[in-house]
Structures are given as C-alpha cells and as structure tokens.
Image (cartoon, coloured by chain):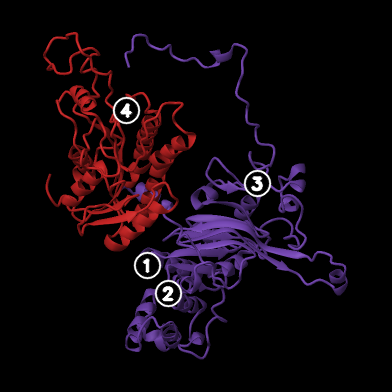
Chain colours: A red, B purple
Amino acid sequence: MAAGALEGSVALVTGGANGLGRAIVAALADSGAKVGVLDLAPCPLDRPDVLSVVGDVAADGAVDGALAALEERWGPASILVNDAADYPTAGLLEMEPAAWRHVFDVNVTGLFLACRAFVQRYVDAGLTSGRIVSISTGSARSPRPRGAAYASSKAAVETISATLAMELGPLGITSNVVAPGYIDVRGASEANPDRASDELRASLTASIPTGRAGLPADIANAVRFLCLPESDHVNAAVLAVDGGSGAGRFRMPGELTTSGPSAPPTTGSSALPHSAGDPVGAGA
Amino acid sequence: MTALATELAATMRTPLLETRGLSKHYALQRSTRAWLRREPGEVLRAVDDVSLAVLPGRTLGVVGETGSGKSTLGRLVLRLERPSAGQVLLDGQDVASGGGAMSHRLRRDVQVVLQDPYTSLNPHETVGGALAEVLKVTGSVPAAGRPARVAELLDQVGFPSGWAGRKPGQLSGGGRQRVSIARALAVGPRLLVADEPVSALDVSVQAQVLNLFQRLQSELGLAYLFITHDLAVLERIADDVAVLYLGKVVEQGPAEALFASPAHPYTQALLAAAPKLGRRRSTTSAVAGELPNPITPPSGCTFHPRCPAAMAVCREVVPLTTTTATGQRVACHLYPGSTPGTEPPVRPPSTPASGAAAVSHPAPSPGGTR
C-alpha cells in the first residue's frame, strides 16, 4: 500500500492504545493520515502524527471532545475507526448484570455516540467523503460458550454499520466492518495481555485454513484498505479477516489437530469444538 | 455528492441558532388592592415555549400577525430581552452560560435589520460615515482600511461607491434599507435577524430587496431569521417556516411542504389571504375575527374562536405538537396524536389461548454441531 495514500486525511481510532487498535493507528499514520486515539490508556506510539486523548468512549461528550481536539490541531476528521470494546468471558450465571450492561455501554452505545459525534462534525465541516470502519468479530455469527455479551454486542455493531451505510451513503460516508478471526496479540497489548494457553492457541490455529494465527497488522491492513479512496464503492460490507476460518468446518470434531488439510480424518486426541471467534479480541 | 445529498447535508448541520422552550412572560402591574390581597397578577405570555432552529446558510421564516410575539422572539434571540424560560443556543452552546466571550461572539455573529429605514438611520450622517462608525466602534477594521471596507460593503448591497457621501434623505426607502443591510454586514455576521425588513417598502422595491437578501445569502453563506406578517414574502425566501399565534408555534416545517399542504387551519387561512408578490396586497383581514386579548387568551387551543374547523375538544384541551404525513410539526386537534390521552392505546402483548402459536418460528434445524 502506498505510503502517503491517506495524506491529508484525519482519522480517529477509538480503543487505539493497545492491541488491534494500536496496529490500526500505526497503519493509518504510516499511510500519511493524522490519527487521534481515544482510549482509557494513553497511546504508547510516540510520533508527531498521533494525538492521544484519554477518555471513555461510552461517556457523554468524550468522542466529541477528542474530535474537537483533533480538529483544532489538524482539521475535521473524515475517518472513524470504532475499535474500542469490552469483552469479558463469562457464562450466564457468572456474568454480573452490571458487567453485561458495561459491554453494551461501550461496544454498542459507545459506537453510536462516536458515529453521532463524527457525522455531526463531518456535516458541519462540509466534508464530502468519509469512512466509518467498525471492528466486529467472527464470533458475532459463530459464537462460543461464555461469550454471549461480546458476540451479541458485535452482532449489533454489524447491524448498526449496515444501517449507517444506507443513512450516510448519500453524504459520501461509507460504513464497513472488519471481522477478525483468531488474532495472536501477544506483545501487542498491555491492557489485555494474551493469556491463551499454548494448547488453546494450537487448537485455534488448527482451525484456520491458512495455517497461522492472524496478526494485528492483518486487521490494520484491512482497515486501511477500507479507508483508502480506492474503496469508495465498498459499503455495508463485513470483511472477514480470519484466514478462512469462518468459511465452514475446516476440521470436524475429533480430527487430529496436527494433520494437514489433505490428511484423511483420523481418530485420536481431539481438539475442542472451537469457533472462528477471537478469544483475545480487539481494542480496549 | 448529488444536489439532493448536498441538501440533505445542509439540513443535518448543527443549527447556527436554536431556541429551546423559549418563553417571555411579562408580569403586568397589579392594583394595590390585588397586591394586598396577594392575588396572582396577570401575565402576558408574549412568547411561550418556542423551539426553533436556524441552519447555517439557510432561512427560517417566522410568520404571525401583530401581537403574535414574533418581534419579541427576535429580541430574545438578539439578547435584547432576557427569556423567562428556555434557552438560546449559538452553534449548540447556551448563550446564557457562555459568559463574556459568548456575548462577544453573539454580537459578532448575529446582526439585525429592522423594519423602518426612516427611523433606524441618522438623517445627518452620510452613508459612508454610518458604516465607518460601525467599523470603528467594533474595532473590526483599522482606520486605514475603513474606506476600502466601506466601498466593499456598498458594493455588496449594490450601491456605486460614490454614494458613500449621500445622506439618508437623498435615498429611497429601498436605498435606505440597503444601507441598513450594509451596516448589519459590517462586522461580518453569520446570521441576520430581519424583522419585517421589506414591510415598509413598495411591492416592486420589496422584490429588489428580497433579491438582495438572496444574493447575499449565496455569496456570503448567511443565515436569516426572517420575521414577517406576510407569507408571500416567505414563500419567496424561506427554506423553513414557523407560524406563530399568540406566542406559540402552531405549525412549522420545510417551506415547500408547508406552502404545498398547510396543515393548521390558521396557516391555511393566512395562505388563502396572502397576496402573491407583484400583486396588490389584500386589504381585508387575513383571518376572520380579531386576535384575542393575549392577557386572557382563549381556553384550549387559543385559535379556536376564529377556527372554521373548531370542535368541542378545541375549547377545552391544549393541543400537543405532532408530525404530519408531509413533515410539518403541527399543534391542532385535527391531527392524530395532538389530543393528549387519546393516542391509540398501546396494545398489550397478545396472549392467545394457544400460547406460543401466535408467532410461527421456523423449526430448529436438526444436526447442527455448533
């Protein structure tokens, strides 16, 4: 991707301090965009084209404040990346109602507030081309046990994105989703370190046709594509970036995790019946 | 973007000026006896719970008869009067809580053009002198740059620059109103509050001045709060229209829809009586009957004594505001949702005897492994 392809653009990435969000910030900035980060933690990327704003995306006025700071420094934002998310893992009786509500406050209402503030400023500034990219998850369609809050909140994100694609398309704003599969975020996030066991990691990787776990840069590259002028006609899309793990049952339960895709089904030690979901997820 | 999209974007912008529940109630003086008896005083509700929005670069027309509160509304917006209740917002910020910086912004961003150019100009001062004085007082232009700015302002309102030496007495009514407009433009406002700016002018001159307002809007991106008693003027110039009656907005909406299908009987009557530009103004009263005493307004819908469609409910119940099929907000019992307590009741969830059979769900597919 050409460096400088986003020269002159201003972007806001929510949840951009850690994990996938941080990779997205770096990718957009490397392409020439000026990037604001709204996150609970300051963004560790120390570079002049990144502005870190500490705040809670679910709080009234937080996104608008970040957009105002960005606008004052570099002009109005034409790109919004919704990456901030809360993703507890808890079963029905483990999940406290307050924790459940917090997931929807951040992942759904926070996204709504961010889009609202972004579009109001876009219209007020008289911009004619804009991008909203929201991060979802493969588990929105293929959920795993103990992931109801996260998966259902991300299903809501996909529905909101499709709705906005229709509402905002006439204004020149496209609204798309990037849905990651399993992403190995070891070393990419201090806020949410990757705690997956080697065994789980191996079994998840075995479900991916490309034979490797996704990396934050894979997601960032997809987001960057959806921000480029060339993606002008891509709207209301859900772009799965999962190595093909969401396509179907690459492995049947009971298959050896070590066998290659061409190996005949064998019996033996079994992998967990896993999903395309990302137990390590995205954002802050 | 297409023209339609540009129009859509224009209507989505943060209002340049907004009023929320804006009210001005004047307490009338009580007799000593009434005061001693602690009787409640009479109150004139000149402006009552008015919520409007003027979008950047667009025109909101406010129409009403004498006594409707339209000029008080203009004075409230200009902060020449303090509201009894409600807010005025500039770019989404409450002007009352903005302190000195906000007052300064309001004075720079919002300027006024009044009805009578005969009394609003000093007869002894030249046109150029009047304009230069504004530039001096506001400190917006240093002394050396003032003659050029005065020439620019005169040019904007269609005067030859040589007319800077003329006095108001040497100008026609239309010419004087152009000077008033130039004076309002001097500080570089974004919104003009125009209170009956063409009412004192001949019909042919009215058209010229309205043309000037339209040209300035497209050249400078100005927004207008255009206050008038004359719907024909608004048909010519307004993007959105609000109809005031006894201090309340009885109907508001996009001008095109409002003129094509006026919803409120008052709007319908005003429109039926409105002359088209270029025709002689009708001398008969626009609406049957006279405006009631605003101190003791009629009960229920205040328009009911004059309304050809009045029903029993109109005498008793104040109508709520509802949205019509064509997109206007109207307060009239003729429209569903306007009469409190009569909305179609929310149906309780159906509980047929057969239980879950009310909604047919697809049968779960067997054999899924996930």
Label 4 to label 3, Cα distance in Å? 47 Å
Identify the mark nearer the N-term, 3 or 2. Answer: 2
**Crowding at label 2, few (<14), some or many (≥20) Cα neighbours within 10 Å?**
many
Name the quarter where the C terminus of chain A is drawn: top left
Label 1 to label 3, Cα distance in Å? 38 Å
Label 4 to label 1, Cα distance in Å? 52 Å
In this view, A183 is above or below B292: above
Identify which amino acid the numbered label 1 is placed on.
Answer: Leu
Horizontal side of A92 relative to A14 (left or right) equals right
Residue underneath mark 1: B220
**Crowding at label 3, few (<14), some or many (≥20) Cα neighbours within 10 Å?**
some
Horizontal side of B56 relative to B244 (left or right) equals left
Whether labels 4 and 1 share one chain: no
Q: Foreground: A259 or B360?
A: A259
Residue underneath mark 4: A139
In the image, residue B217 lies at what x, y percent?
40, 65
Residue underneath mark 2: B185
